[in-house]
Image (spheres, grey):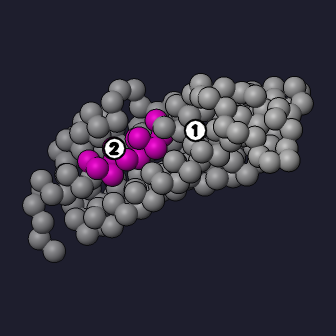
Amino acid sequence: MEVGRGTVAGVAALIVALVAAVAFLLGRESTRQSAPAPAPTGAPSILPLGDAAAVRDYFERVAAIQEGPAGDPSSVANELLAASIGGDSSGFDKLIQGAENGLAKLRDVQPPAACTEYHKKLTALLGDSLAMLRSLKTALAKQDADGIAGLAAQASALQQRTTDLDADATVIKSRYGLH
């Protein structure tokens, strides 16, 4: 399929921006101060203080791990793409290395019982984001428009999973009176 460089760059920019936004939103959600959601029916409004401390500590550890690239995700994406299209994939290499390191650190975290399912989902999401970054780097190097276009749907799915995970974090935090 013959597609112009501008189209490839545009789709790739969207994907990189979405992946960067996923990382940004996850880190932001871990530390966001939000109004507590209503407690589930039949559950105590706030659970034991020791459990709350463990949940708070967990989200703080996760936030420290999830520091993404500095700056606006769209700007970072544009810089990565411009360099990559010019043959310099070092920006992607650095981003991928950072994601690999973050995922390894996340896997070492032992979540409290209240965060076990959240932690599994977060680990899977970051692993899938890392795989997408690798695929995007390869597709850009090969100037594979079909490969890049195929990643767009995956990027949208990652964004939805991030939104769902944000909601999960809000519910967990509110159960323990964390804002």
Are there few (<14), some (14-19), or many (20+) residues within 10 Å of tag 2? many
Q: Quadrant of the C terminus?
A: top right
Q: Which residue is mark 1?
A: 102
Query: Which residue is at a point 82% across and 35% down the rendered structure image?
Result: 45
Mark 2 belongs to which amino acid?
Answer: Ala
Q: Nearer the viewer, residue 112 or 94?
A: 112
The numbered disc on residue 87 is: none
Classify 172 as above or below 137.
above
Residue 15, magenta (yes or no): yes
The residues tagged by marks 1 and 2 sit, at their Cα atoms, a distance apart of 19 Å
| SS at badge 1 | helix
Mark 1 belongs to which amino acid?
Answer: Gly
Q: Is residue 88 visible?
A: no
In magenta, the rendered stretch is: 13-24
The numbered disc on residue 17 is: 2
Give x and y (percent) for residue 170: 64, 38
| SS at badge 2 | helix
Q: Is residue 6 left or right of residue 75?
A: left
Q: Nearer the viewer, residue 157 or 98?
A: 157
Q: Is residue 49 left or right of residue 160?
A: right
Q: In terms of secondary structure, what is the magenta stretch mainly? A: helix
